[in-house]
Image (tube, rainbow, N blue to C red):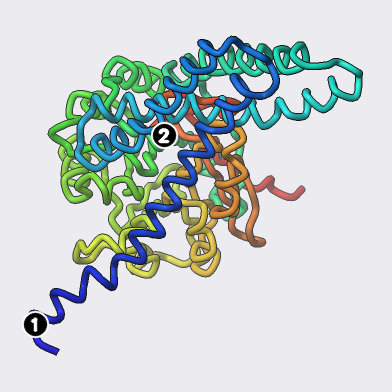
Amino acid sequence: MSVGEAVESEPKRRSPRRAIFGFVVLAVVALLFGVPLMTLFFSGNAWPLEVRLAGTAVFVLVALAFPVLMFRGHGGHSDTASVIADTLLGVVWVLFTWSVIGQVLDLVLRLAGVDDPVRSRVVTAVVLLISVVLLVWGHTEAMRVSRVRRVDVTVPRLGPGLDGLKVVQITDTHYGPIDRSRWSQGVTRVINSLEPDVVAHTGDIADGQVAQRTSQAAPLGDVRATFARVYVTGNHEYYSGALGWVDHMTSLGWDALHNRHIVITRGGDSLIIAGVDDRTAAGSGLPGHHADHEAALAGTDPSLPVLLLAHQPHQIDAAVQHGVDLQLSGHTHGGQMWPFHYLVRLDQPVLQGLSRHSERTQLYTSRGTGFWGPPFRIFAPSEITLLTLRAAPTPH
């Protein structure tokens, strides 16, 4: 085959995949917008024709604009388009969810003998009321400075000199198209008020290049810790210039644990703090970027306990294989917007909280400190996590 023939045939090989992708996007958009449209305007509520036409026009126009805004925002790096598209995504997700749930109410009212149009109008009113309340509350939750979640973790191999070591974890800050510089300052104030020994950022620091998010990330330079401030990459760094963020965090005084470790010592006892790249790093094309537990733990004393930073809970299997005592992860956002957590669980072994995965290895999964995309958190509050490490009780 000639070079010319190869070039000409490439679009033909790609076209079925593009067509399938386009069909899936079209189907998802049609479902997300179509179900609320039918529930609110065409479910037997007998609204005047003018109301149904106006509602249809609004939904159709927004549905047509949504993929364009999403592409321009996240593909073309337009912050304005991103904010609009992400907000629309959150709104339509809530409307879709409660429109589906509204069918249960419709069935109950039908069995109770309530006829249309009263039945459908009651469902419409309930769907709208719940959606508005959840969106207002969810936006407030997303934009507020995260609450502190306090967790005690017993690490049997931890020496008594390190008993009570305070590790503060933040993750998934997702500095993005909404300027959250003041929010970032608030997070730093909370962290410092906890007087941590170690502060760990477990990835997804931002959506955007360093130059775009410098002011939002700047307060991280003011974070204080007795022994160490440590950071690992998440998957979003590999969409936003991972090398730039690793270098920037180093310039702010953080230890970027790019498949490496440090050792801290207190009271004669030591703890290994290691970090590995995100599981998506290998596909980024960046030389040397991939999750490498052997490199991260190279040269360490096998008798010492290991605290591992790895962005995704999915990476816990490798932690078990390498004898890690405690892995800190984020990535899941706790689902962020109920009931999206059911989809998250299809990909991740844990949604949030402390879990055990072998006789030695435990995992703590944070719900995240910020949010991605839609500026809403519904039944999945953000957190700044204070983990207090405890040595095993001494037998009497």
Cβ atoms at labels 2 and 1 below 8 Å apart: no
Badge number at residue 291: none
Q: Is residue 301 left or right of residue 393?
A: left
Element marked by disc 1: helix
Depth check, front residue: 32 or 311 = 32
Badge number at residue 170: 2
On screen, residue 312 above or below 330: below
Quarter of the image holding residue 236? top left
Residue projecting furthest to the right = 112
Identify the residue at horizontal 39%, vertical 34% (top origin). Answer: 372
Q: Is residue 325 left or right of residue 208?
A: right
Residue 31 drawn at (x, y percent): 53, 39
Q: Amino acid at mark 2?
A: Ile
Residue projecting furthest to the bottom = 1
Residue 194 drawn at (x, y percent): 45, 22
N-terminal label among 2 and 1 = 1
Element marked by disc 2: strand
Identify the residue at horizontal 60%, vertical 20% (top origin). Answer: 40
Badge number at residue 3: 1
Q: Amino acid at mark 1?
A: Val
Quarter of the image holding residue 276? bottom left
On screen, residue 283 above or below 27: below
